[in-house]
Image: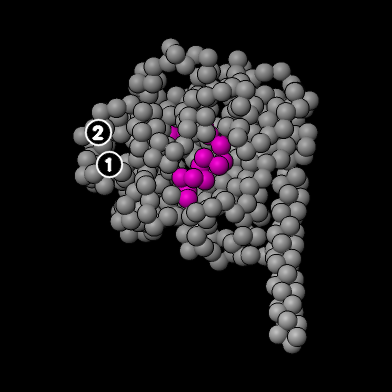
Amino acid sequence: MRILFSALSMMMVISCLVAQVGNGEQLKDKELSRLLSKYAAHDEPGIQYIVVDKSSTVYSHSVGLSNVEKDIVLDASQTMAAFSMTKTLTAIAVLQLVEQNKINLDNKVTEYVTHPYDPNITIQHLLNHTSGIPNPIPLKWVHLAREHDDFDEQFELNKVLNEHSTLDFKPGERYKYNNIGYWLLGRVIKSVSGIEYLEYMSEHLFQPLNLSSNEIGFQIYDKNNHAKGYLKKWSFMGLFGRFFVDPKMLSENETGWVHIKNVYLNGPSFGGAIGTAGAFSKILQDLLSTESMLLEQRTKQLLYQQQMLNSGTEIDMTLGWHMAELDGTNYYYKEGGGAGFHCEMRIYPKKGLASVIMSNRTSFNSRKILSELDIRFVENEI
């Protein structure tokens, strides 16, 4: 009888503990849902947010609308433009070629593609944004999706190179964020691999992770499953955007929001990826894994290696990531924003966690919002 009583008591304790854990998870979900709803009301453009560890999804939630005019709710399957988050993917592709001894980081870029700049610019200079190549505002380096069949990337790149042919400083002297450098890296990948950049990315990054073309790619696979990008009408860009971008890319007002028509970047390697937060999270999961499908362990370390200038001064940049800290925890991140979208992805290696946030509105403070959300997982607050 005493044994039976003890067994029943133990079962009750275990049941209580399980209930407490379950209630804790429910509280966390409710708190995160409340925070997400604060940043994207039910009648506004939305947010996809996901947190993963190396083997599973820790949390995933979407709020807001993918289409304001038709009141279509945003869900996790809908794609969005990632813009500069693409740069980290391009860096991974370059490091794959380094791993295969097809490229050395200190190789001159002129060994692979022609450019008007200092011939001493190396692959590493392009990866860590220390090349000195100018960085003009790229708002007009886009074309409508419906114009893509007639688009000539090399022609557009040559035009940009001719218009901005003078270095801002000598290679390695300073750090300065640069889009042209990553556009050139895309052409390097084509030159070395023998196939187009888009084909390489599909074969060597997306397919190994079983990511389909309706999850991630460089074109809109299904326009009915692609979120519409927006500008707030009563914002600076909403009011004066026609002076900065081609007016044909802007549509009529949709209940206080200006819709930006579907566009592709002229340089896909510096910002052309289109996908879901979930798809990008699978790439981050692979990087967290000890058995990465994309990079060997020694090569993966290069991706996280802090860079320095010729002077020996360290910069908050690796070969593809920016570096920052959240309440004492170091992380690597890449932010992207442009015509109607804003997003950011992060990886916290010591915590074994990664996160992605994507929104279909240009004026979205991803840095602040992602920090406010991620802290609950990094610090296990709730």
Magenta residues span 270-285
Left or right: residue 155 versus residue 222 is left
* In-front residue for pair 71/345: 71
> Can you say which quadrant of the picture contains the C terminus?
bottom right
Q: Which residue is mark 2?
A: 192
Residue 28 image point, x, y percent: 71, 58
Q: Is residue 8 above or below residue 196?
A: below
**Label 1 near label 2: C-beta < 8 Å?**
yes
Magenta region, main secondary structure = helix
Question: Residue at point 59% right, 62% down?
Answer: 378
Kind of residue at disc 2: Val
Residue 376 visible in rendering: yes
Depth check, front residue: 103 or 127: 103
The number of numbered badges drawn on the structure is 2
The image shows residue 347 at horizontal and vertical percentages of: 50, 54
Q: Which x, y percent locates residue 201?
A: 38, 34
| Mark 2 closeness class: few <14, some 14–19, many ≥20 residues within 10 Å | some
Residue at mark 2 to residue at mark 1: CA–CA distance: 8 Å
In terms of sequence position, does the residue under pointer 2 or pointer 1 come before the other? 1
For residue 20, which quarter of the picture? bottom right
What residue is drawn where x is 77% and y is 39%?
41
Q: Is residue 58 magenta?
A: no
| Res. 15 image quadrant | bottom right
- Residue at x-position 65% and y-position 49%: 369
Q: Position of residue 316 (x, y in %)?
A: 44, 55
Numbered mark located on residue 97 in the image = 1
- Label 1: few (<14), some or many (≥20) within 10 Å? some
